[in-house]
Amino acid sequence: MGAILVTGGAGFIGSHLCDRLVRDGREVVCLDVFDNFYPKDQKLRNIEAMKEAEHYHLYEGDIREPAVLEELFGHHDLDAVVHLAARAGVRPSLEMPRLYTDVNVTGTATLLEHCRVYRVPRFIFGSSSSVYGNSDVVPFAESAAAAKGSGCAPAGAAPAASCVIAPRKPGASNVMLVPGSCSRARDPKIRTVVVIPLVLPANSARE
């Protein structure tokens, strides 16, 4: 089996996933930009237990930078990409819509292009519950329609656009889209942990 690249791998979702994959004996490549939206020292604590693991590789870099991705994709034989990196937060996205679109949409498209060039067979995309906008129907369901127009902030519009791009990217025929923020459970590592890290390894094993 090849390595698994986890973008946003030092965040509260990604670090739990990386930890699980490392404990399962998988080779993990963690990419995180360590921006200032969350404290860097908190993210470093998230991955502290894994840093000395033989099959864990940490890279600090931006998913929008082709040179960063060239190094990762060229150096590691990747079996899958789990894409969790994104600018988060509805309110900040209203203040910085261009940045959010650039990171969340352009960054996703750049990753997909490298998957195509390097023939990575699996691309698992963690989206956001923000795509549902100001829906009165809670809890959200994956079958619900994405918000349109003024009901969707850039934080939601960007992952919604990425969901359109991903399955239509030329050569990217094996794409699994996994909406984020399904349900939450308290975890001492950081504020909450989403159930996605428990779901993704099972999906990967079945595929």
Image: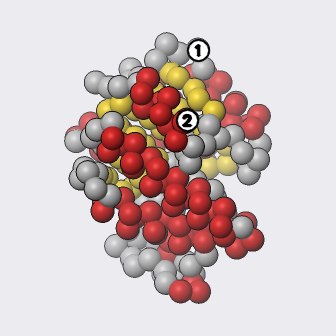
Q: Please, what secondary structure does the residue beneath circle 1 have?
A: loop
Tell me which amino acid carries mark 1. Glu
Q: Position of residue 92 (x, y in %)?
A: 73, 66
Q: Callout 1 environment at 10 Å: few (<14), some (14 to 19), or many (20+)?
A: few
Name the mark on residue 89. none
Tell whether 159 sits left or right of 58. Answer: left
Q: Nearer the viewer, residue 75 or 89?
A: 75
- Please name the residue shown 39% across and 49% down the image: 112
- Please name the residue shown 52% across and 41% down the image: 66
Q: Position of residue 48 (x, y in %)?
A: 65, 24
Q: Is residue 18 visible?
A: no
Q: How many marks?
A: 2
Q: Nearer the viewer, residue 14 or 160?
A: 160
Which is more foreground, mark 2 or mark 1? 2
Dividing the image into 4 quarters, which one contains the N terminus?
Answer: top left
Colour mode of the rendering = secondary structure
Name the mark on residue 52. 1
Q: Mark 2 — residue?
A: 68
Tell me which amino acid carries mark 2. Val
- Please name the residue shown 57% across and 26% down the image: 58
Residue 12 position by quadrant: top right
Q: Earlier in the sequence, mark 2 or mark 1?
A: 1
Q: Position of residue 134 (x, y in %)?
A: 57, 81
Q: Callout 2 environment at 10 Å: few (<14), some (14 to 19), or many (20+)?
A: some
- Please name the residue shown 49% across and 64% down the image: 159
**Distance CA(mark 2)–CA(mark 1):** 22 Å
Q: Position of residue 141 (x, y in %)?
A: 40, 70
Q: Nearer the viewer, residue 31 or 204?
A: 31
Q: Is residue 163 visible?
A: yes
Q: Please, what secondary structure does the residue beneath circle 2 have?
A: helix
Dividing the image into 4 quarters, which one contains the C terminus?
Answer: top left
